[in-house]
Amino acid sequence: MRAAMISHVHVGVTDFERAFAFYSDVMDALGFPLKFCDRERPWAGWMPTAAARPLFLIGRPHDGEGAAPGNGQMVALLAPSRAAVDDCHHRALSGGGHDEGSPGLRPHYHRDYYGAYFRDPDGNKICVCCHDPE
């Protein structure tokens, strides 16, 4: 039986070095190590420590066109704790991200849902969340 439903997510970026610095800090707050970084392509990917999937990837769009966020699209990253949600959100805003929802409980999702929302420097909407009770 497979434990994960997602293989990978790719987020298009316009400035790879800026995005790499931004997401390196965000992924560090969540405890996801860098799997690879290829600046010539350019693209990079992070993964969970205990599994090879899912991967979170950033890079230039494969069609060579400019990167643009989609309306209604969002990537939600799982945090190991509520403190990690807080730390990640803080790092995202400090690194050039824009607030889309401060860390806090969202009981309309479920009793223990603790999340935060931000946009990366390219405008991609990202959520970090923890589903565990405090």
Image (cartoon, rainbow, N blue to C red):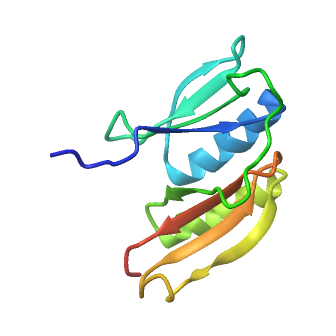
Name the residue rendered at 81%, 26% in the picture. Answer: 65
Q: Is 86 displayed left or right of 13 in the figure?
A: left
Residue 9, placed above or below residue 62: below
Q: How many labels does the image show?
A: 0
Would you identify the image quadrant in which residue 86 lies? Answer: bottom right
Name the residue rendered at 32%, 41% in the picture. Answer: 50
Image coordinates of residue 117 in percent, x first then y, are 67, 67
Q: Which residue occupies the foreground of this view, 52 or 123?
A: 123
Q: Which residue occupies the foreground of this view, 45 or 34?
A: 45
Name the residue rendered at 83%, 48% in the picture. Answer: 121
Residue 55, placed above or below residue 74: above
Q: Which residue occupies the foreground of this view, 72 or 10?
A: 72
Image coordinates of residue 21 in percent, x first then y, are 74, 37
Q: Residue furthest left?
A: 1
Image coordinates of residue 47 in percent, x first then y, are 46, 37
**Quadrant housing the C terminus:** bottom left
Name the residue rendered at 72%, 56% in the picture. Answer: 91
Would you identify the image quadrant in which residue 41 lies? Answer: top right
Residue 129, placed above or below residue 60: below
Residue 47, placed above or below residue 106: above
Would you identify the image quadrant in which residue 24 lies? Answer: top right
Q: Is 86 displayed left or right of 39 in the figure?
A: left
Image coordinates of residue 7 in percent, x first then y, are 40, 38
Q: Is 4 displayed left or right of 23 in the figure?
A: left
